[in-house]
Image: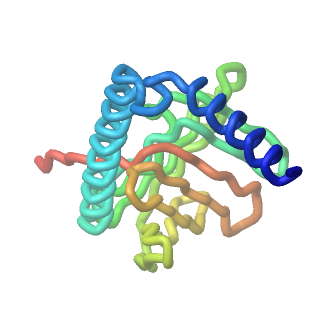
């Protein structure tokens, strides 16, 4: 008898929950379905665009004509980070065997380059490319300038042209990290 009452109670609870569902819950709201399809389509387009940008950045780095336009410059020792920077004044540039690193993060102090930062221009040496297991491209090289020499490690993240450059001065000084996007550089030879 107890089993019959329990089964009837379970049946009524089951019927009550099934009847409480609306057709939209069962079949899906057409507006939601279209919205999900549009979001998935936009996500696929973004992934394709990012992968094409990664291939362009990879090709430019192998040819030696590229620029990393920094949006963020970080000095880990002093815990100072500058955000929303101008990529035209904060960059790492490669023109064949010539390299330039420039920062211009201070608007108050003119710095060594007159723009609130430092510029290192010199010859690049010991270039080496590698790819890690996540398919991130890594470029390592040295740049030798008149006053400053530095080791540079640039990592371009797979599927995107977003990159990070870790710059370590060889003769002391504070290392810095620049984060931004790798853009192919078009150099007009005269």
Q: Residue at x 44, y 78 (%)?
A: 130
Seen from the viewer's position, the closer of residues 150 and 64 is: 64
Residue at (36% x, 60% y) in the render = 98
The tally of labels here is: 0
Q: Relative to residue 108, is residue 136 depicted above or below?
A: below
Q: Is residue 11 above or below residue 177?
A: above
Residue 125 at what x, y percent from top left? 43, 75
The residue sitting at the left extreme is 190
For this orientation, the residue located farthest to the right is: 2
Q: Quadrant of residue 108?
A: top right
Say whether residue 139 is visible.
no
Q: What scheme was used to colour the molecule?
A: rainbow
**Residue at position x 61%, y 59% in the image:** 167
Give residue 187's position: percent from left, percent from top: 20, 48
Relative to the observer, which residue lies in front, 34 or 141?
Answer: 34
Specify the quadrant of the image occupied by residue 20. Answer: top right
Report whether residue 126 is seen. Answer: yes
Identity of the residue drawn at 27% across and 41% down: 45
Is residue 170 left or right of 24 when viewed as pictured?
right
Q: Where is residue 100 shown, x and y percent of the image?
A: 44, 52
The vertical placement of 172 against 133, above or below, is above
Q: Position of residue 165 (x, y in %)?
A: 55, 56
173 left or right of 26 in image: right
**Considering only vertical position in the picture, is 32 above or below 82?**
above
Please tell me which residue lies in front, 31 or 9.
Answer: 9
Quadrant housing residue 44: top left
């Amino acid at each position: 008898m107890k089993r019959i009452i329990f089964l009837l109670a379970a049946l009524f609870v089951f019927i009550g929950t099934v009847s409480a569902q609306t057709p939209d819950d069962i079949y899906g709201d057409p507006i939601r379905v279209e919205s999900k399809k549009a979001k998935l389509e936009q996500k696929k387009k973004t992934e394709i665009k990012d992968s094409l940008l990664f291939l362009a950045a990879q090709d430019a780095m192998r040819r030696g004509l590229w620029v990393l336009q920094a949006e963020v410059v970080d000095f880990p020792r002093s815990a100072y980070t500058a955000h929303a920077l101008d990529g035209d004044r904060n960059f790492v540039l490669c023109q064949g065997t010539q390299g330039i690193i420039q920062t211009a993060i201070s608007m108050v102090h003119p710095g060594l380059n007159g723009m609130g930062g430092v510029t290192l221009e010199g010859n690049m040496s010991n270039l080496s490319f590698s790819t890690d297991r996540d398919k991130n491209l890594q470029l390592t090289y040295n740049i030798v300038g008149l006053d400053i020499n530095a080791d540079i490690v640039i990592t371009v993240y797979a599927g995107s042209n977003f990159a990070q450059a870790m710059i370590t001065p060889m003769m002391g000084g504070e290392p810095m990290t620049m984060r931004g996007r790798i853009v192919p550089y078009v150099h007009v030879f005269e």
